[in-house]
Amino acid sequence: MAVTIDKYGRVLIPKEVRNRMGLKPGTTLDIAVRGDEIVLKPRDVDLEKRVEGLEEFLEREAPKAFVNPTYRDDSKWFSRDYCLRKLGLSRE
């Protein structure tokens, strides 16, 4: 199946493909370039909501060992920001 890019860079996804994938107006698609391919993937909104819920839970309920600042030269515990970054939950 071939599609054409218009002068504004837009591509029309054929109705058959939209129906098969359950794409509705307003659906957010992630775009990735893999080698010489362009990949469009519907964003999993439910997954994003679950990650946000986990982030909120961790901010409220995380064990103190993971959120306390580092004391002196003791590197046994990691800072809260470091842990959230490693989990991919940092808002930075």
Image: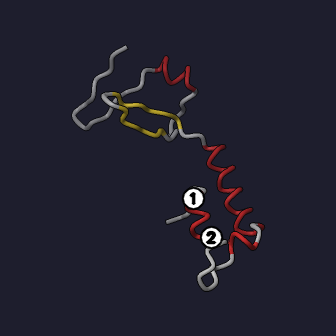
Which of these two is toward me, 41 or 19? 41
Helix, strand or loop at mark 2: loop
Q: Residue furthest top?
A: 1
Give coordinates of residue 79: x percent, y percent: 61, 73
Label placed on residue 46? none
Q: How many marks?
A: 2
Residue drawn at x 65%, y 52% is 51
Name the residue carrying label 1: 86
Name the residue carrying label 2: 78
Q: Is residue 69 left or right of residue 28?
A: right
Q: Tell me, yes or no, whether the two marked residues, 1 and 2, touch with CB atoms within 8 Å.
A: yes
Q: Is residue 9 left or right of residue 21?
A: left
Compared with 55, 42 (above or below) is above
Q: Residue furthest left?
A: 7
Q: Give the quadrant of the N terminus.
A: top left
Give coordinates of residue 71: x percent, y percent: 64, 83
Residue drawn at x 49%, y 33% is 41
C-alpha separation, residue under disc 1 versus residue under disc 2: 10 Å
Q: Amino acid at mark 2?
A: Phe
Q: Amino acid at mark 1?
A: Lys
Few, some or many residues within 10 Å of mark 2 (<14, 14–19, 20+): some
Q: Residue furthest bottom?
A: 72
Give coordinates of residue 60: x percent, y percent: 75, 69
User: Based on the displayed image, in which of its 4 quarters is residue 45 positioned?
Assistant: top right
Residue drawn at x 61%, y 86% is 72
Judge depth for marks 1 and 2 and give the one in front.
2
Helix, strand or loop at mark 1: helix
Give coordinates of residue 48: x percent, y percent: 62, 48
Compared with 48, 42 (above or below) is above
Q: Which of the marked residues, 1 or 2, is nearer the chain's N terminus?
A: 2
